[in-house]
Amino acid sequence: MLEAIIQVKPLDSWAIDISNKLGVPIRIVESAMGEDGTISSLVEFRLDGISKEAVLNEVSSHPDTKELVISEEGDGVITGNIVVNKWMMIEALQRANIYLLGAVTLEEGAVEWRLLATDEEVLRKLVEDLEEAGAKVSLSRKLQVNDLSLLTRRQEEVLENALEMGYFDYPRGVTGRELAKRLSINQSTLYEILQNAQKKLAETYLLRKRMN
């Protein structure tokens, strides 16, 4: 498996548009495409002198974003789930069968992605797809990784606590509400992180099995 960091300056991106308008970076923690074609992402906004209402107003007025449901607030940061109608980058990832480990907007109007790819050919095809769509792409880092590097630190922390506290046992040793309280996060955020982490592990397992 390959972990790669690429910088993409696309023709259209709700994240870049809103980040530039507000003057603050946006971090995309996790993303998944729904059956209806919309993209659901766990995102983090650093307020840096702007209000929560300003963020909500920009999200509601952008033509590609449907809604932002805030799940956590504190220390000048708000975290929530955003639903997007259109996002060229995630659509390219779906076609390339590459997993998004995280992303953040940059000041120069680009998005930096941290990706997990099965091999060089898959990564090359993603870059070609993006460039054919008119995006400028540059590779910042590329290295071989093992299965221990698949999850984000947040996903690993949540899964470890869930396993230790018996969340996956039958009967369960802890409820979702109790686990969310232990981790000091919103219950809906807990379920979203667990779902995305388990999906990533399952997809990687099946992908490796097909390759053998």
Image (spheres, grey):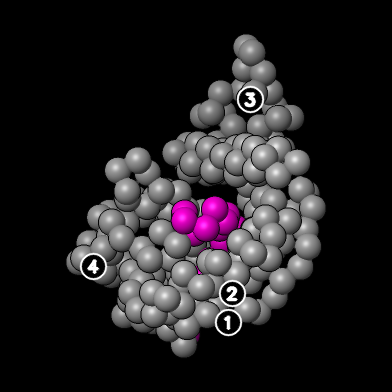
Residue type (three-letter) at the residue carrying disc 2: Ile
Q: How far apart are marks 2 and 4 (CA)?
A: 25 Å
Which label's residue is closer to the chain start, 1 or 2? 2
Q: Say whether residue 155 is left or right of residue 61.
A: right
Query: Magenta includes 102?
Result: yes
Residue 6 numbered tag: 2
Residue 189 seen: yes
Identify the residue under disc 4. 62
Q: Earlier in the sequence, mark 1 or mark 3?
A: 1
Q: Which of marks 2 and 4 is in front?
A: 2
The residue lying at 61 percent from left, 61 percent from top is 122
Q: Do the residues labelled 1 and 3 touch (CB within 8 Å)?
A: no
Q: How far apart are marks 4 and 1 (CA)?
A: 27 Å
Q: What's the residue type where badge 3 is placed?
A: Tyr
Judged from the image, the secondary structure of the residue bearing numbered disc 1 is: strand
Give SS at disc 2.
strand
Quadrant that contains the C terminus: top right
Residue bearing mark 1: 138
